Image: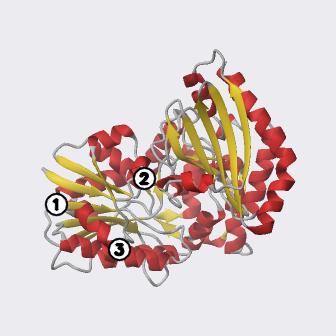
Amino acid sequence: MKRVLLTGANGYIGRRLKHALLSKEGIELRLMVRNANSLSSSVQEHAQIVTADVLNPASLDDALRGIDVAYYLIHGLNHGNFREIDRQSAQNFVDACVRQNVKTIIYLGGLGDKKTGSEHLLSRIETGEILSSRPDKINCIWFRAGVIIGSGSASFEIIRHLVQKLPVMITPKWVRTPVTPIGVDDVIDFLLAALDLPATSNLMVDLGEEAMSYGDLMLRVAKAMGLKRYLIPVNVLTPKLSSYWLAIFTPVPYSVSSSLIEGLRSEVTVSNNLQHDYFTIKPHTLEETVKRAIGEIESNQVLSRWSDSGSGAWEVDHSHDIADALFIDRRIIELKTLSPDKVFRSFCSIGGENGWFGYDWLWNLRGFIDKLFKGAGINRGRRNPNSLRIGDSVDFWKVVDLVENERLLLFAQMKLPGKAWLEFKIHDGKLIQSAYFYPYGIVGRLYWYILIPLHYLIFTNMALSIINRSK
């Protein structure tokens, strides 16, 4: 029985790999998270859960004790000094692996080289180098992937929204840069297959089959979706303008779009053929991958999204912060004959394509303004229109607590002069809807007071609509 540790289990790749590992025979799976409540009860029943943080070296020894193979799927892109955090995290992890006699680290990084790499790509390369730096003590299987195509991936979400909304696109000159795409399901297959490789030496495996330009990638995705699109490359679109363009027309915020735009200047193509030398996996064609992704979206079977990764807001306890909130807007309505499960399902369907149960034009305006200020924006939507889980995005909110038939707690990820939460709670036969706000200074207080009239309209209507939809 092989003992396996998975880090990054709540991220885009991590969620899918976790799902695959849980169904794989012959392994004992351990999941390393910062908060066990971020995992569903079914996952906790079938895997060992350990609480640890790569920035806390002492916590890693317990997480890695007795482990044979450790997956490293951690990246600190959301932090301002992410390169330094990534270096320290990787060093802490490999040192702990050596102390605990782990045999192999499996890591997923990005294609490219240091000469032309973006800050994001350089950080991924540095992480791989650190994890591979102790071949005398531990082996590292380092996979490198370029653009990952799949339902919910950031790259595919951007391309899909652009080709759906814009028949003709004015694009920056970087769309001519070569890239090698690969399907997310193929990536998961390679990560799983690596478990069966003998631990003999370090290995760096480039993933992907067919190189093409970013422009050709967009046109082929459009064609696979049954669309005819045209690109007009120009030299006047700066990286900043391009980032704003993507942020406004796609679900990704400015922080993500700017990282992707910066990476457009880097060639991300395969430099070795080891995927065929060591594995029998044949990657799917781009067209097959796109059609599968679209099918998952249309059937509400998206297993993970790019926004699953993030600030880790769902991995901390918000109860203390809510208790410190200076402003509260609360609505209480008797359920009477309504069953709690119907009310719960009603407020858990809010956001995304379902809207905000009234005054959607105000929510859309707030989302547009948020995008202008480099926030998450309201068009991030939700993974599934009918169900939620901890860590899911709901437009510019994040699900940080979810108790069946009792509570939904959302944390605001919009740009605010403070911190905000929106809570729906069923208690003692009542629906209790509360908006909490902790202001930053005088600006935060002015922000709350200015919005009081709008809050009265929006939140009163929201509570009544939840009850009416429950009927």
Query: Which residue is tagged 1?
Result: 66
Q: Is residue 147 left or right of residue 231?
A: left
Q: Is residue 25 above or below residue 311?
A: above
Residue at the extreme top of the image, as rendered:
337
- Percent coordinates x, y for residue 458 in the rendering: 79, 40
Q: CA distance from mark 2 to mark 3?
A: 18 Å
Along the line of sight, the residue nearer the viewer: 338 or 284: 338
- Percent coordinates x, y for residue 49 in the rendering: 30, 51
In the picture, which quadrant includes the C terminus?
top right
Q: Is residue 184 left or right of residue 328?
A: left
User: Regarding mark 3 in the picture, which secondary structure is present there?
Assistant: helix
Mark 3 or 1 closer to N-term?
Answer: 1
Q: Amino acid at mark 2?
A: Asn
Query: Which residue is tagged 2?
Result: 10
Name the front one of labels 1 and 2.
1
Q: How is the image coloured?
A: secondary structure
User: Regarding mark 1 in the picture, which secondary structure is present there?
Assistant: loop
- Percent coordinates x, y for residue 441 in the rendering: 75, 68
Circle 3 crowding by C-alpha within 10 Å: few under 14, some 14–19, many from 20: many
Q: Quadrant of residue 260?
A: bottom right
Query: Which residue is tagged 3?
Result: 90
